[in-house]
Amino acid sequence: PPEGAIKDLRAGPRVRAVEPQPEPGRSLNLSQGGVAAAAALGTLSALPPGPRRGTRPTVGRRPALARGPCPTAEDGLHRDRHPGAAREAADQAAAESRECAGPAVAAATTAAAATAAVGTESPWGLPLVADSPAARAKVVMAELEHLKLEKKPWPTRTHSLHYYYLTLSEPGPSLPKFLAVGYVDDQPFIRFDSRVGKAEPQAPWMTPMDAQYWETETRKQEKWAEVQQVEMWTVMGYHNHSSGMHSTQRMFGCEIQEDGRYRGFWQFGYDGQDHLSLDLETLSWVSAEPVAMRTKHWWETERCYAEYDKAYLEGPCLASLHRYLELGGQRFSRREPPTVRITEHSAKDGGTILRCWALGFYPHNILLSWWLGEKELDSEYAETRPSGDGTYQTWAAAWVPAGKKAQYTCRVQHSSLNHTFTVSWESSHPGLTAMVISLVLVLLVVVGGVTLTKCIQARNKESYEQA
């Protein structure tokens, strides 16, 4: 349900993105030059590229948002010189949208179309004439390489910067129309709620950011709220949903690994289910359901929008992540080792299910596996979940023949451990073994006591009879 999605946006759609894995130190093979991106590197930007632009024309009974053409330098100059004509184009597009859409959609489309037509900024807020997504990514990656050469702090383990957007078709007093939350690793640091109307810090290390930073974040999130609302109503039309509670989710982010490699993802969901994911190698959108093919065709009308997304993930996203790690300091370097236990469960076929639990560990990346000697077994895995105290828990289960559980071991690999930790049924239950031994000793004492008592009674009886 939408309320549950608001409580934990990370439980949203799960789409496996196809991600590039460049070798450490490999420079991006990007064309085009430009220095406009350098202007943005001095300020910290937590937000992705600005919203995609377009208008909603009349297409029968199902409105479909058509994206506008990719912006060019000439287009930017034209807008600068002829703002009146651009405004007229925006008004005309908005009028077309109102013919087939409801009031909420028309209002969102009007704002998006006006921003698209008269704005002189790119989706990243940079001057349209000089902006190039490839050039910006190249500048940012050069800066990251410079940080390495200066021997500034670099991630000692895998770190990530993720964002989660949620739009609801029927908001209310307790439900926002649009909600955005940003995470560094698993810690929320920024939040935008349409009911509040401004971006707010969610972590103490974000309080030093100045007013201009928060104003910029607020403005960009407001634009995203408008665009994602139009996207939601369009996809609702694809599903023949004209009313009721529905939602769209957008998840995207980047990750820096310990060896210096990076990866990114960009995903879109509808009603909590997978819809589209961006293939960063081919710059194509992968559909997760038949209806998503219509959204795919819509989004692929102009390739530049996928280029913007990829360039953001490979450039500004990584630079922002590195700076956030510096701001957060030691908060992102802590490690908590797991507590490992094995539990036994009966299987229907007479065998035994052994479940290896890892509890109270941080960070969340962990590897559990079951082994018989030196042979790894097929196992069932649970998704790693928060424990509620800032740590995580998970388990892995394997079927074993009845009476053979002592021969199987569970191996645990985690960044808090300097070696692979191996645990067996006996080692996982030392207290149980001691308890069994204690019970056996108690039984022996009881049996011995009863036997001794009977012997004494028998002797006393013989003595009494002789007397």
Image (spheres, helix red, strand yellow):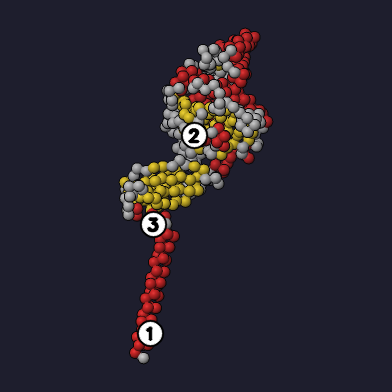
- The secondary element bearing badge 3 is classed as helix
Residue drawn 51% across and 20% down?
237
Residue under label 1, please give it: 460
- The secondary element bearing badge 1 is classed as helix
Q: Are marks 2 and 3 in contact (CB under 8 Å)?
A: no
Res. 389 visible in picture: yes
Give the quarter of the figure containing the N terminus. Answer: top right
- Mark 2 Cα-neighbour bin, 10 Å: few <14, some 14–19, many ≥20: many
Give the quarter of the figure containing the C terminus. Answer: bottom left
- The secondary element bearing badge 2 is classed as strand
Res. 115 visible in picture: no
Which sits in the foreground, 304 or 112? 112
Rendered position, 242 above or below 432: above
Q: Are marks 1 and 3 in contact (CB under 8 Å)?
A: no
User: Quadrant location of residue 259?
Assistant: top left
The kind of residue on which mark 2 rests is Glu
Residue under label 2, please give it: 255
Q: Are marks 1 and 2 in contact (CB under 8 Å)?
A: no
Residue under label 3, please give it: 426
Q: Position of residue 225 (x, y in %)?
A: 59, 25
Q: Position of residue 167 (x, y in %)?
A: 57, 27
Q: Furthest residue to the right?
A: 211
Residue drawn 40% across and 72% down?
446
Rounded to the nearest whole Å, what is the CA distance between mark 1 and mark 3?
A: 47 Å
